[in-house]
Image (cartoon, coloured by chain):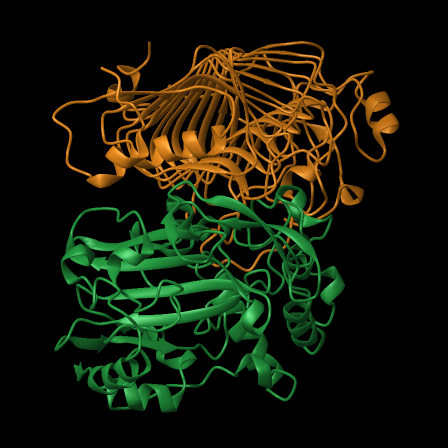
Chain colours: A green, B orange
Amino acid sequence: MIRNLAILGAAVATLAVSAGVQALPPPKVDDTLIASDSLPKTLGNYGFFLDRAANDPAPGVVPYRLNMPLFSDGADKHRFVYVPDGQEIAIGDQGLLEFPVGSALIKTFAFGEGGGQRKIETRVLLHRADGWVALPYVWNEEQTEATLALAGKRVPVTTPWGEEISYRVPNKNQCKECHGLEGAVTPIGPKTRNLSTAWLQSFLGTVPEGADTMPRWEDRAAADRTAAARAYLDVNCAHCHRPGSTASNSGLDLRWETDDPHAIGINKRPVAAGRGSGGLQFDIVPGDPEASILVYRMGSGEPGVAMPELGKATVDEEGVALVERWIAGL
Amino acid sequence: MIRTLMAATALATLASPAFAETISVAPGDGAQERLQEALILAEPGDEIVLAAGRFDLTDGLSLDVDGVTVRGAGMHASVLDFSGQRGAGESLLVTSDGVTLRNFGMENPKGDGIKSKGADDIVYQGVRVTWTNGPAATNGAYGLYPVESTGILIDGCEVSGASDAGIYVGQSSKITVRNSTARANVAGIEIENSRQAIVERNFVTENTGGILVFDLPGLPVKNGGEVLVRNNLVANNTTPNFAPEGNIVASVRRGTGIMVMANDTVWVGQNMLYDNPTAPIMVIAYPLAFEDPEYNPYPREISIDHNQVDEGGTDPQFEGAEMLLAAFGGALPPVMWDGLEDPEMTTLMVHPDLAGWSVNLPEQGAGIESARPGPLDVGAIGQPISIEGWGAPDELEARLK
């Protein structure tokens, strides 16, 4: 068990930033609301941020980033974690940080550069006494408030490469399609292997073994091709394609730690791919990305074919290239 | 009692209800959000009632609350129209237990129609899934798709146009598929890697293959078997195969009636089989290479009881069909076996009234070119098997209306 040492430091820093801001209620994170069984109507209700635009985190709300992020149509993501004062964090299976009851993970999805950046949605994972709850909030045009959108929403956005897409904010159940494991909602991203040594040192006060082993997305060109591709597949696919999760019946297990070649798709026939097979025989054909169903489905934007099934309106060309490079070298 | 879906009141708190409520959802503006919100905010025991009319939907719906009923005004009256679907792999995903789906239709899902995964004790009654353009490789794979579940009752449903299987039950147990119509799919009804299934009184027609009982290697749930296929009308399954390559059903020959591949203990009896011109009844081993050490590719304990069958394979889709037809006098006998067996098990028993033939393949994985065709020489069916515990549990039957 590790004390959450970063709380105090983060609190001092954020207070300094917000010194000139006039009373914006509530002044601190609303622990009662996180713990309650309610579905708060706006993001502002929680008090995670000191400003209405959700740029300045409140005391105890700590930003973090992942080495290898999930692709979400090119959205820029702002991630924060909140752990109640004095609570402890454990390291769970495969280095997943186990946040105590009362914690929250907050992730904002935004498009556009610099000052012109527009927030689309903020997803909140709340750790309540009876488990984690996932809730999506959609930002208003004025960028002053994000409102609960249980049923999800479609929003027109322009991707960083200039493509006009209909961006899908997931509904509450769809949150669970990715975050569900053995029927319960769970965080996916914050595993020590996908977090930087420096952040872990500052946040936990220690760096667990196996931390920071996934290559950073921006370093992918120089990274080991297997490590880069397997990290990408773990982060983008393995929340469903693993035992106990949404796509378990496929028998495909794309987790970072899986070493059975058949389970990660090598010479594996599809089970229920339908037209997702693209007329191809195997998930991965070593040395032949074009004959691999995995690449075909990653490269498609068409519902019923496209993988991932959710959170994707456009193809991650650079991600596909990463996986192609790996398969070509197998 | 009707609970109005006023967002403000509904969102204020999620207190437990004193008793079940009825939530009505009508077609029209915002149907996607209103219906999805109802599915999310429902509580165990609630009924979500789809008004008559056409719901234009753009994204997959999902239900994750136990014990909820979703019912419409009829399979042609309340229609979930996914012609404009833009995302998600299935049109309705159910992940909770004790759910009842009744009396509504779904059209043109982009992927699968209704998938229920890890959803025990589910009833599908009077539900229709249709791809309105007829057979096409661009249609979604499965119409009704329960998987990894215990307790499944499908009654009075109708699926047509699926590019894989109309009604597909996978990796599940305690299953009944009854009184349903599967038309113009690649596979009409498919039971795969499942146990204790009863498939009865269905009308299975105009598919590539009618009823498939498959056991495949490499899946999380293995060793399918204990399947009863009785009293079905399996006719005119002559649609050319339109499944995308790579899927196991893409290898099903046009004109297959009832097909058993691998599996342990399957009883096929009292069916009427007409115009299934490759093989009215086919029993074969898994034909492909596999690595799964726990997998048995051979059929075991397959009983073919009396079935009402026409002359048999009059237009078989095999290489060398003409020679075969000439050798057998114009039609292949109704029961076809590939001749492969687990040497330690009884493979096949056939009622003496039914003629058959064996492809006599030399080994598992061999192609049809190595066939040494001959008459079927297997034992007669033995004692009736016990089907105690097979089929959907009584509690599901009690939910039928």
Depth check, front residue: A29 or B250:
A29
* Up/down of B2 relative to A278, above or below: above
Q: Give left or right: position of B204 versus A247.
A: right
Residue B209, given in percent of the width and then of the height, sits at: 65, 26
Count of number-bearing discs:
0
Q: Is residue B220 visible?
A: no
Q: Which part of the image, by quadrant, shows the N terminus of chain B?
A: top left
Residue A146, given in percent of the width and then of the height, sits at: 39, 53
In percent of the image, x 24 and y 90: which residue is there?
Answer: A205
Depth check, front residue: A179 or B230:
A179
Depth check, front residue: B192 or B401:
B401
Depth check, front residue: A114 or B152:
A114
Residue B52, given in percent of the width and then of the height, sits at: 48, 12
In percent of the image, x 50 and y 76: which residue is there?
Answer: A68
Q: Is residue A232 visible?
A: yes
* Up/down of A102 relative to A329, above or below: above
Q: Which part of the image, by quadrant, shows the C terminus of chain B?
A: top left
Q: Give left or right: position of A207 versus B302.
A: left
Residue B298, given in percent of the width and then of the height, sits at: 54, 43
* Up/down of B181 relative to B286, above or below: above
* Up/down of B43 relative to B340, above or below: above
